[in-house]
Amino acid sequence: EDPSLRHPGQRPFQAGAAGAVIGTYEPDIPFSMPLTALTVTQDHFAKILAYVKRTRSTKFDAGAPPIISSFSSLGPNIITPAILKPPGIDILAAWTRLLPVSKNIKDNRFMSYNILSGTSMACPHATGVAAYVKSFHPDWSPAMIMSALITTGSLSDQLSSSSH
């Protein structure tokens, strides 16, 4: 067996999959894969697989999104009240090779990427969504794109959801 196929995501990638759901015992440990993928606990993976086998469908309602992070400001900043600043959580981001990944000077691991969380980590998501909208409407101004994103969004309240 090819050793490169042992890394999560390699088999679906080589089979031409657009994405993958991968069951793992450590779903909160981030790692990079060669395709868009989601890691879930083995229990959740078994439930997803049972659903797909039962319905013969790969489309399903994932339910409410995760709740906001514990370190979020939970709303507008008093300095810039018109701008919400949601944090991104555990985002694979570019990193300087001049600083160890742990920021500890005794750490000898220097990488071009690191897993980061914070407000600035949400920016790539918002930028990606804006670029996606722009690809369908190349003549739209930034204000038009922002308006489309704001006016088509909807609120979610996971705390009142019966799914947990």
Image (tube, grey):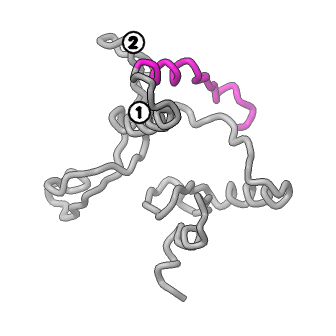
Say above or below: 31 vs 158.
below
User: Residue 154: percent from the left, percent from the top?
Assistant: 61, 23
Residue at 43% x, 61% y: name it: 32
Crowding near the residue tagged with mark 2, few <14, some 14–19, many ≥20 C-alpha atoms within 10 Å: few
Disc 1 and disc 2 in contact, CB within 8 angstroms: no
| Disc number for residue 87 | 1
Residue 65 placement: quadrant: top right
Crowding near the residue tagged with mark 1, few <14, some 14–19, many ≥20 C-alpha atoms within 10 Å: many
- Residue lying furthest front in this view? 139
Residue under label 2, please give it. Answer: 82
Q: Is 114 a magenta residue?
A: no
Mark closer to the observer (1, 2): 2
Residue at 58% x, 63% y: name it: 24
Disc 2 marks a residue whose amino acid type is: Ala
Report the magenta residues as a range.
Answer: 143-164
The mark nearer the N terminus, 1 or 2, is 2
The alpha-carbon separation of the residues under discs 1 and 2 comes to: 16 Å
On the rendered structure, is 116 left or right of 38? left
User: Residue 47: percent from the left, percent from the top?
Assistant: 75, 55
Residue at 74% x, 60% y: name it: 49
Disc 1 marks a residue whose amino acid type is: Pro
